[in-house]
Amino acid sequence: MAFAVLYLPLVREFGASRGEVATVQALVLLLGGGAGPLVGFALDRLGARRLIQGGAALAAVGLFAASRAHSLPAVAVLYGVVGGLGLAALGSQVNMVIAVLWYPGARGRAIAIADLGTGFGAFCFIPLGEALASAWGWRATLVVWAALLMVVVIPANTLQRLPERPHPGSARPARPAPWTLARALRAPAFWWLTGLRFFAACAFPLMNTHMVAFAIGQGIEPVEAAAALGSVSLVSLAGRLTTGWLADRIGRAPTLTLTFSSAAAGIACLALLAATGSPWWLPAYVLFFGMAQGSSGIVASARAADVFAGPAFGTIFGWLSLAIGPGEALGAWAGGAIYDAAGTYLPAFAVAAAALALGVAAIWRVSAPAPPLSTVE
């Protein structure tokens, strides 16, 4: 999310269009989801500690190298590809799998609490990135981010692990067989969850990547615009906890319907900001959109665990997450491309609202099929 504060500085330095610069973030997001099967496989095989620490080291190398780049294509390769591959191992996919496996009886709340770091991190890093970029430039900002990955993320995950799996008994009656990837791919629930992840991935990164540039275009000071985006993440702390609590009590689909309706209301507030010029619509956007930020990952992860939890859940969830990268890349790129074509962000915001509606439709279609029964072991 903090790429948003580097967006306009990169446009100015390289003289590129907004769509071209947004491609850098699109690559990060594409790999974040596109590497999902690989990340899920590695989580099941290597364990959480080695995966997260290795990803942090790779991301740090990519960000530091990008800070030395002197062309936009070089930034795209180093930040977008190398950094993107490393960041894929640090994303919500891994943390949410860890949470649902540790706390199967309270999945919604466990995911929400673990995911508080996402919102709080964005709240810290977006204003920090804006301050660094304004004072020292985007290159120094990348160096600071790389250093923090090395001195915070790697030591913090020294003790990270997955729960021990129970040892198989000598003889057991027939029971549901563990889900395998092949079985999951034949279940309609898998594809509806894939659709939800794709549509949500289109909507939220589109808004997060371009909201700062939109607000500046409406006369908001850059520092205030960055603070507003950071405040979205701060509000999302309450939103994530609320989402997790509701998901465990009223159900996954009703909860997502409420949160996506809140996000759509936030997008409407930005349209009213453009129509009226009143800056008071920006805090309203922060409130409504912030309460929904992160809700799709919490609900989709909990629902996926409801259906597919088992020894291969990391791999299955990784393939579910494959839809995130293309969705996020499309959303981030489309926001800039639509602006280049129309001269305004409002049509792009309408696309985000439509994607939210399709995500709601998808979650209501998810049902839990019964897996085949295994015989005595």
Image (cartoon, helix red, strand yellow):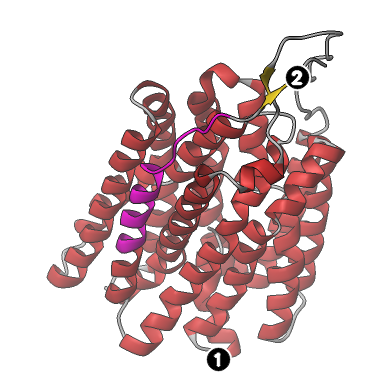
Q: Is 110 or 121 nearer to us in this picture? A: 110
| 122 lies left or right of 336 | right
The three-letter amino acid code for the residue at tag 1 is Gly
Answer whether residue 137 is visible to the viewer in this image: no
| 188 lies left or right of 252 | right
SS under mark 2: loop
Residues packed near mark 2 inside 10 Å, few (<14), some (14 to 19) or many (20 plus): few
| 109 lies left or right of 42 | left
Residues packed near mark 1 inside 10 Å, few (<14), some (14 to 19) or many (20 plus): few
The percent coordinates of residue 205 (x first, y second) are 47, 61
Q: Which residues are magenta?
A: 353-370
Real-space Cα separation, disc 1 to disc 2, in angstroms: 65 Å
Tags 1 and 2 in contact by the CB under 8 Å rule?
no
The residue that label 2 is drawn on is 375
The residue that label 1 is drawn on is 15
Residue at x 78%, y 35% (from the top left corner): 157
- Which image quarter is the C terminus in? top right
Residue at x 68%, y 53% (from the top left corner): 36
The percent coordinates of residue 45 (x first, y second) are 85, 39
Answer whether residue 102 is visible to the viewer in this image: yes
* 176 inside magenta stretch: no
User: Mark 1 or mark 2: which comes first in sequence?
Assistant: 1
* 369 inside magenta stretch: yes
